[in-house]
């Protein structure tokens, strides 16, 4: 693994993404994790680049190569390097720690950049280390050029300037250092048919394919880039030569207003959505309660970050699961989609609208910062091939066929009523949309029996979601193993590696990944078939563990154990495997 330490705002992200994409262009499975602070400039930032034959996307325990461009963190960065590791550092600043057990490459990045273009030196100082690293580990020049073209959108002047800096970095290493370190990269054919994309881009594209026509949003990290990506796609694909559009976007004054606009548009028949994070979802709570009780569709993307309060806005966590599932005062529960990959962000992007409209309810997609903002290698997306599911919408001709109609009547016995949309010319199509007590015909009511009947119908509707939401997946099965793992979201990408680590210790496991709430009966069936279950998640309070406990038979509760992590960093496989090895009561000296 390569760790690049720089200062936030120094322009290092372009350099890091060039390295990442160049390795991808060489056919190498590569992951990138951007660990950045919540200020605009000055504080330390790191970018982790990992290449493995197996394609493990989670960060590794050990750094093999450290690129040191921020003197403020050199001592910390160097302290993490084991004997024989490599350190590439900007020699324009004196190395503060002497380590004769490391392989050191000094290179005057700032001086080289000034020699190329004194006015633009700050912009290309980081690009010099791209060349140095490329020469040291063997990143092909052809791959670097392809990555440059992508990064700078084929802008020739920018490409030429940065390529010059890369070449100078290469040449300095050739002329001043022997390449005597053990880590090299060689071309493979392991990324054919794949692409680099982040979860926010994928979710935006999925929303486009889902027929979104209205977006209301307020900027907040780490969800902003999802809205920004969607706006870009809408401009590209939903605008005509004459200037007309088939969509509307509103940047609201705050998150509360954005939520209100989403439900207003959803009530009017639009496929509407918003994106938010952190405190933003808290501010939307009142309107989400209205959407649940008045039964108005809307899609809410929550790119989770570390809370509570402002918390750590640029760190990742899965700590909004319980909050979003039961969001709102009073009794309320909501459908929640839990993507683990960009491919699922795309799928849930379009599928969420079908769920929201079929069940006439607020629908959540819970991603996180790691998935949303980091670059991932993804398989091609699977595009929807069926018409949109608009749910139970009565048109004029439908109303002509029935004697009477009531907005909240449970005609089909599934808890889902029929609705009409504004513009329906039938005289009986109108109704009052209420967040206060109402009867089956949408008439104001405080009758206790009517209220209780309505709430039971809403609960029945929620139960119907269990069969319609994306079902859990058995991601790994080793036959008759007694140990089972359950996870959801991006923890999945660390568990793939965890399985291999445990296998080396003669621990065989089966693994189920939850993809949505409410829970499918298949979760209970999986627990039934094992003696010991570990639930892996990224939050302090073991939120999924407790949600599962609420629905388990008493005989199964004692089987489940929590492995919860809450440091805000992308999950590492070694943590999970060590925790399981320590907590298991099943003998592991032979295969389970």
Image (cartoon, rainbow, N blue to C red):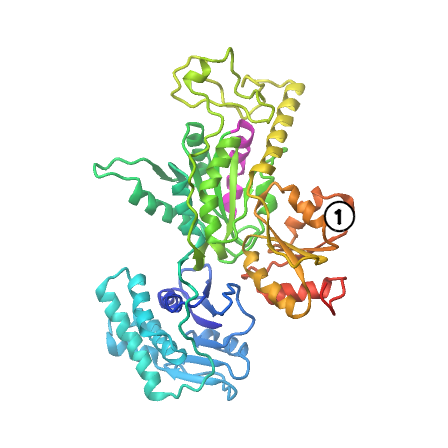
Q: Is residue 120 visible?
A: no
| 540 within the magenta span | no
Residue shown at the point (59%, 26%) measured from the top left: 415
Q: Find numbered disc 1 in the image and state the secondary structure of the residue it sits on.
A: helix
Q: Position of residue 399 (x, y in %)?
A: 46, 15
Q: Which residue lies furthest to the right in this view?
A: 555
Q: Position of residue 376 (x, y in %)?
A: 45, 59
The magenta segment: 278-295
> Residue 168 occupies which quadrant of the picture?
bottom left
According to the picture, the residue beneath numbered tag 1 turns out to be 556
> Residue 196 occupies which quadrant of the picture?
bottom left
Q: Which residue lies furthest to the top in this view?
A: 403
Taking the image as shown, residue 335 lies to the left or right of residue 3, namely right
Characterize the magenta stretch by its predominant secondary structure. Answer: helix
Is 254 above or below relative to 537?
Answer: above
Residue shown at the point (48%, 29%) measured from the top left: 391
């Amino acid at each position: 693994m390569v760790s690049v330490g720089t200062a936030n705002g120094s322009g290092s992200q372009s350099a890091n993404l060039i390295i990442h994409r160049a390795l991808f262009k060489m056919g190498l499975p590569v992951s990138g994790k951007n660990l950045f602070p919540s200020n605009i400039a000055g504080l330390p930032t790191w970018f982790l680049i990992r290449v493995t034959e197996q394609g493990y996307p989670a960060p590794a325990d050990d750094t093999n190569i450290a690129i040191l461009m921020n003197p403020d963190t050199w001592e910390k960065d160097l302290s993490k390097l084991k004997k024989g590791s490599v350190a590439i550092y900007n020699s324009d600043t004196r190395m503060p720690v002497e380590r004769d057990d490391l392989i050191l490459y000094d290179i005057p990045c700032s001086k080289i950049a000034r020699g190329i273009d004194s006015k633009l030196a700050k912009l290309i100082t980081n690009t010099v280390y791209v060349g140095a690293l490329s020469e040291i580990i063997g990143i092909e020049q052809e791959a670097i050029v392809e990555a440059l073209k992508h990064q700078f959108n084929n802008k020739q002047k920018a490409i030429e300037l940065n390529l010059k800096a890369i070449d100078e970095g290469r040449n300095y290493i050739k002329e001043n250092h022997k390449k005597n370190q053990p880590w090299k990269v060689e071309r493979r054919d392991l990324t054919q048919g794949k692409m680099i994309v982040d979860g926010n881009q994928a979710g935006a594209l999925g929303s486009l394919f889902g027929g979104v026509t209205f977006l209301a949003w307020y900027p907040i990290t780490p969800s902003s880039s999802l809205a920004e990506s969607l706006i870009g796609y809408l401009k590209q694909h939903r605008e005509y030569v004459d200037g007309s559009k088939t969509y509307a976007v509103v940047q609201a004054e705050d998150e509360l207003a954005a939520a209100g606009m989403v439900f207003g548009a959803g009530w009017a028949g639009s496929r509407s959505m918003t994106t938010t994070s952190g405190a933003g979802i808290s501010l939307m709570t009142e309107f989400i309660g209205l959407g649940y009780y008045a039964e108005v569709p809307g899609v809410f993307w929550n790119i989770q970050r570390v809370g509570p309060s402002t918390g750590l806005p640029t760190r990742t966590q899965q700590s909004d699961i319980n909050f979003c599932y039961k969001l709102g005062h009073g009794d309320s529960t909501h459908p929640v989609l839990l993507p683990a990959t960009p491919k699922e962000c795309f799928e849930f992007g379009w599928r969420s609208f079908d769920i929201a409209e079929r069940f006439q309810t607020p629908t959540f997609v819970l991603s996180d910062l790691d998935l949303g903002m980091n670059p991932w290698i993804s398989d091609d997306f699977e595009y929807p091939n069926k018409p949109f599911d608009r749910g139970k919408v009565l048109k004029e001709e439908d109303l002509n066929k029935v004697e009477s109609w009531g907005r909240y009547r449970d005609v089909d016995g599934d808890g889902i009523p029929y609705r009409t949309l504004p513009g329906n010319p039938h005289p009986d199509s109108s109704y009052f949309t209420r967040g206060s007590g109402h009867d089956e015909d949408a008439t104001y009511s405080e009758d206790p029996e009517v209220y209780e009947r309505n709430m039971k119908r809403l609960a029945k509707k929620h139960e119907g979601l269990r069969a319609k939401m994306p079902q859990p997946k058995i991601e790994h099965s080793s036959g008759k193993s007694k140990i089972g793992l359950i996870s959801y979201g991006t923890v999945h990408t660390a568990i793939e590696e965890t399985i291999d680590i445990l296998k080396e210790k003669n621990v065989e496991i089966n693994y189920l990944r939850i993809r949505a709430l409410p829970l499918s009966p298949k979760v209970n069936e999986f627990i039934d078939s094992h003696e010991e279950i570990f639930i892996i998640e990224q939050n302090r309070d073991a939120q999924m563990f407790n949600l599962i406990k609420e629905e388990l038979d008493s005989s199964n509760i004692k089987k489940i154990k929590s492995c919860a992590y809450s440091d805000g960093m992308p999950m590492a496989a070694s943590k999970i495997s060590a925790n399981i090895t320590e907590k298991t009561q099943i003998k592991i000296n032979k295969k389970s």
